[in-house]
Image: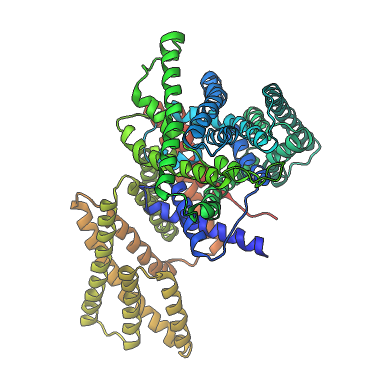
């Protein structure tokens, strides 16, 4: 029960931090999650959570690296293989040696082997930590690909170097020859196991399909379980690198998928959606756990009165700058080597590019999980030297690199361009597609499907508003919402005026007048206070129907007819005024939103007197209209691609956007 409570608590915190991150755009979500985890751990008395390296690597790192390997552009991986392997192996060793020597010089109380262990675990980078920053600034694509590529390997190389350094402290013995041999074994055998097991699992799935077993849920689940199976076999049975194995298996899976995705499209869509959820949850939980473990990891050191907090802060700053400095010098040297000696790059090296490459190398989860696995005692039952200080330094460097990336990357990336395409880059193209769909739906309107047309127009208008909101800053968005609110209130005021105008020439019963006034009041409260209009309206309808239940059928019909007559009159008057203003307005977006709203209200009042329709017929009409609108959007994509307005990659992204909408329309639940 305690484990279940912790899991549910972590998931709730994950949702909370993502909501906060949506509004606090200055901070990356990873940093917000660390801060929230830290606050929660401090606020809850006696709260502790233990993170074991073995299960953390299995449950978190294995699936994330497998998914990253499966989606990493292999052309870029091959093109940048020298830089990636240089950063993942040589830079890790340089950071371990030079960083270790510096730590031992700065803090002689930390033995050289323990200093090497600290520097080694600080060498792996964590691109997930910087993703929140990369989404809102233009980091050059080749730099992000380099960091993503090296992170596929440097987790393994950093952990191997760290484990051998810790072993040297614990046992007092270290052999360079044995360490080198073991590293080569773990790396090569891990890669071979990843390739072999990846091919074997894909072969198993092929055999099952040939045998008639084509359950998409089963095959999707098998694919999700693949990294866990491969990691466990590589680590526990062969004592090789499970990290390298899952990365190799991910690349193999991507190669197989390219040749078979057209034959199992439904499975691929389901699996991609599953991996999206898994990656979202695991990435968030990683940084929450990081924040949750910080207080307990650093408490004993902070309570030590013999160690000044300012001195500790100085140690963190010095070590952080040395680690980033080593990365900067390495990047700058390699950039010059590639440009002047190998001549395989066209971009001239610059200090700015090297600084960006250095700052993007944020330290994260592997560093914290590895350092927390340091044993308390050596083989001679002595305390591990300066364990608390080592943990504090590692945690401090993680936060320092993340904060520095948050502050300086946006400054350094000004004026940079990125060829990296995301859905957020295609907002204008999506708006064009939605506008085409709206025009198509308008042309399809008939007396029978008018209510469905207005419902769809309202949905597409809302979608268009959300897309346009992405191009608005917070002030513009606030102004738009305020205009919409004022327009709603103005229209409701006109409804009251037109109701009085109708009453001046027609006799209206008091029960009808009260019902209309109540309807206006509910919508008015929803506009002013943001209350849930749907719940209020449904509650009122239930209460109204209960009161009218005492009327005879003839009396009920008269009341309903009178209410409809009054509201049709007022809705038509309000709608005419809105359309007249929209025709001369320079920014009619808000007015169009209101027009579609009142057209739908008006049609609901008029439809029962025109034609009685079964719900299944309405659903069928809605599906046909949706598919027609989707077909128009596909034509818009083809025209934009033909005109050269979008690239092949962008066209694929837009088609995926349309396909998701189509899958919702065509989806039917099947047991």
Residue positioned 45% across, 27% down in the render: 326
Q: Quadrant of residue 616?
A: bottom right
Residue 140 on image: x %, y %: 40, 29
Task: Evaluate whether residue 420 shows in this view.
Answer: no
Residue 351 on image: x %, y %: 34, 23
Residue 206 on image: x %, y %: 75, 33
Q: Residue furthest right?
A: 211
Residue 658 on image: x %, y %: 48, 42
Query: Considering only vertical position in the picture, is 619 above or below 191?
Result: below
- Which one is in front, 511 or 552? 511
- Which one is in front, 616 or 352? 352
- Which one is in front, 192 or 393? 393
Residue positioned 58% across, 42% down in the render: 371
- Which one is in front, 636 or 35? 35
Quarter the N terminus occupies: bottom right
Query: Considering only vertical position in the picture, is 384 above or below 191?
Result: below
Task: Evaluate whether residue 555 shows in this view.
Answer: yes
Q: What colour scheme has been applied to the protein in the rendered image?
A: rainbow
Quarter the C terminus occupies: bottom right
């Amino acid at each position: 029960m305690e484990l279940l409570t912790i899991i549910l608590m972590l998931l709730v915190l994950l949702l909370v931090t993502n909501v906060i991150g949506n509004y606090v755009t200055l901070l990356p979500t990873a940093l917000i999650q660390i801060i929230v985890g830290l606050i929660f751990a401090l606020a809850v008395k006696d709260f502790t959570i233990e993170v074991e390296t073995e299960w953390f690597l299995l449950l978190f790192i294995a699936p994330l690296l497998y998914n990253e390997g499966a989606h990493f552009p292999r052309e870029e991986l091959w093109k940048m293989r020298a830089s990636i392997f240089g950063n993942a192996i040589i830079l890790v060793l340089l950071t371990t040696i030079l960083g270790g020597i510096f730590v031992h010089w700065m803090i002689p109380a930390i033995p050289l082997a323990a200093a090497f262990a600290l520097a080694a675990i600080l060498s792996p980078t964590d691109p997930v930590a910087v993703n929140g920053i990369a989404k809102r600034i233009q980091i050059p694509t080749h730099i992000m690909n380099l960091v993503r590529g090296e992170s596929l390997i440097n987790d393994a190389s950093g952990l191997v170097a760290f484990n051998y350094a810790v072993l040297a402290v614990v046992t007092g013995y270290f052999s360079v020859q044995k360490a080198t041999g073991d590293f080569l074994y773990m790396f090569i055998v891990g890669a071979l196991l990843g390739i072999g097991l990846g091919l074997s699992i894909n072969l198993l799935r092929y055999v099952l399909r040939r045998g008639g077993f084509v359950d998409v849920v089963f095959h999707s689940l098998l694919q999700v379980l693949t990294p866990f199976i491969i990691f466990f076999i590589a680590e526990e049975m062969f004592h090789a690198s499970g990290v390298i194995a899952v990365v190799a298996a991910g690349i193999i899976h991507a190669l197989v998928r390219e040749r078979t995705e057209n034959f199992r499209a439904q499975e691929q869509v389901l699996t991609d959606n599953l991996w999206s959820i898994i990656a979202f949850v695991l990435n968030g939980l990683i940084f929450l756990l990081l924040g949750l473990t910080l207080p307990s990891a650093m408490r004993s050191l902070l309570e030590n009165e013999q160690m000044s907090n300012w001195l500790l802060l100085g140690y963190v700053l010095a070590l952080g700058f040395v680690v980033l400095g080593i990365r900067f010098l390495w990047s700058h040297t390699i950039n010059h080597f590639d440009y002047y000696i190998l001549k395989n790059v066209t971009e001239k090296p610059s200090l700015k590019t090297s600084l960006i490459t250095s700052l993007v190398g944020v330290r994260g989860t592997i560093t914290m999980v590895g350092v927390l696995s340091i044993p308390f005692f050596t083989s001679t039952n002595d305390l591990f030297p300066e364990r608390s200080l080592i943990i504090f330094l590692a945690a401090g460097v993680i936060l320092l690199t993340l904060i520095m990336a948050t502050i300086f990357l946006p400054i350094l990336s000004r004026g940079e361009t990125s060829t990296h395409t995301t859905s957020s880059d295609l907002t204008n193209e999506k708006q064009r597609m939605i506008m085409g769909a709206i025009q198509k739906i308008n042309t399809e309107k008939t007396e029978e499907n008018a209510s469905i047309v207005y419902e769809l127009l309202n949905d597409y208008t809302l979608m268009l508003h959300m897309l346009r909101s992405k191009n608005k800053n917070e002030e513009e968005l606030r102004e738009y919402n305020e205009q919409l609110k004022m327009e709603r209130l103005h229209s409701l005021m006109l409804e009251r005026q037109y109701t009085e105008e109708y009453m001046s020439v027609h006799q209206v019963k008091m029960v009808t007048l009260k019902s209309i006034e109540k309807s206006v009041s509910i919508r008015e409260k929803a506009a002013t206070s943001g209350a849930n209009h749907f719940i209020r309206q449904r509650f009122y309808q239930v209460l109204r129907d209960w009161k009218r239940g005492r009327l005879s059928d003839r009396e009920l019909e008269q009341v309903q007819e009178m209410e409809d007559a009054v509201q049709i009159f007022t809705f038509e008057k309000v709608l005419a005024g809105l359309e007249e203003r929209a025709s001369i307005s320079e920014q009619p977006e808000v007015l169009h939103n209101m027009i579609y709203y009142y057209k739908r209200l008006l049609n609901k009042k008029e439809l029962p007197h025109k034609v009685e329709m079964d719900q299944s017929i309405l659903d069928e009409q809605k599906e046909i209209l949706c598919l027609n609108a989707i077909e128009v959007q596909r034509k818009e994509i083809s025209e934009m691609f033909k005109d050269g307005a979008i690239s092949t990659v962008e066209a694929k992204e837009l088609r995926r956007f349309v396909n998701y909408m189509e899958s919702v329309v065509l989806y039917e639940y099947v047991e």
